[in-house]
Image: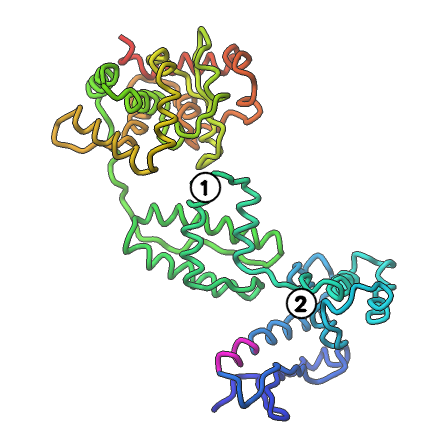
Amino acid sequence: MKLPQYIIIKKKSYYFQKGIPSNLRSVYGKAKYVRPLGLKVSHASLSDIEKARIRELDNYELLIKTITNTDPSTYSQDEITRLAQVMLRDKKISPGSTGNPEIMSNLLPEIDGTQDNIDSLESKVTITAYKAIADAKVLQKRTLDSLYNDYISYKGYTDPRMIHRVFVPWRKLLSICGNQVISNGLIDTLHHALDSYVEQRLNNVSPATIKRELNTLLSILNRGSRKYRLGWMLQIPQLPNHVPKEKQVLTQEQQSLLIEKCLSYINPRVATCVILMLQGGMMPSEIKRLKEENLEGLTHPNTPFITITADTKTKTRKRLIPIVLHSKFIIEHINNTIDWLNTVTDSAAPATLKKFMTKTLDNGKTYTGHCLRHSFRNNAVANSADLGKASLIAGWSTGGNISTQMLNYGSEGLGNSEVVKGLFAESLVIHKHLLT
């Protein structure tokens, strides 16, 4: 069997061996870097050898870095952990072997010198190694999944729906590249995995959907790169040109017919959804998560409104929606509507809305609830409304967003604010064809 590069056999075991650059040998004190792989010739497979070879190649490159660069700000936490692991290995100290401070100091006397320059690279490595003598978990290497967990925690996601939206594409990516230990050298593997992800997903979804998923994946990976100074510069792979489908909207006559049917429909829960979705670009999932405090503004005498403050797809989706259409009907049925949405499955509500709208409009076409959100935008343009204010109501990214601090005002304070009065007046313009 031909041995992989830098692998040699000594005493019936495999070793990693690579020469030190000649200009650095006087600093290192040796001409070669040699380390045992911990693998016996009689038992090791090629896969075992290759994994160990890559590990030691990383350690070699890290060693060269420490010889040429002692600036601690250029080292990731993973690199410091690896250097601490090498320090303990060279001193033949077992991680987690003792928690006795006196014994720990005897095993690693260098710890006494760290107080003089605690921020130096040598001190950081020594302190990490010292902690690992008492607790081996200190040396546990971070994997790609730890970046996912960091991201979910950073975003503050608690809604299962939001977590699922991130989790699914993340698991698809890891099914390609595996839950590997993060390191500076992983960038090529990640680029290959992202390219493969695109190839696989193109068989099932549109490029626009893939781009949204990739944006999420790169947010996770690049945030991790910044946090742990991994030096990754990941970019979205090239996607094929894609002409998006024309968005389906309702004519003003169809909207009027739909609202008229809602007010006499035997299922007021479906009707309430339709009225809210049309005048605020809401989705059933947003209505489902409304709490008592989000509904307090409904009873405001002059400018009734609803706030959306739960976990949303983007920050701009946290917003305030003026209720200019049939507020009394909504007040009467909103609680039962929310209860219904929390009882049925996530797919059942859109299916019910689709059936109601398609039957009501009865023109041979199929209509989904999402077309009500598109119709809101169309109404804003057709009725010459202020598109900036329309964006704030619907939660489009082009319109900025109402601050979280403002959304947490009491209903009375919000209802009397100039911002809400302005949004309410603009909503009257957007929906003037439904108010006559």
Question: Does residue 48 belong to the magenta stretch?
Answer: yes
Camera-nearest label, 1 or 2: 1
Q: Is residue 204 magenta?
A: no
Judged left or right of residue 107, residue 326 is left
Image quadrant where residue 183 sits: bottom right
Taking 114 as reference, is 319 left or right?
Answer: left
Give the prevailing secondary structure in the magenta stretch: helix
Q: Is residue 12 left or right of residue 91?
A: left
Q: Residues within 10 Å of mark 1 (few under 14, many from 20)?
A: few
Using the image, determine if residue 396 lies above or below residue 216.
Answer: above
Q: Residue 372 in the image: x percent, y percent?
A: 29, 27
Q: Is residue 90 above or below residue 318?
A: below
The foreground one among 41 and 383 is 41
Across and down, in percent, residue 24 comes to: 72, 77
| Disc 1: which residue | 160
Percent of width and height locating residue 122:
78, 65
Q: Which residues are magenta?
A: 46-52
Mark 2 Cα within 10 Å, few/some/many (few <14, many 20+)?
A: many
The residue wearing badge 2 is 82
Residue 83: x percent and y percent? 70, 68
Amino acid type, mark 1: Pro
What colouring method underlies this structural image? rainbow
Where residue 336 is drawn, which disc sits there? Answer: none
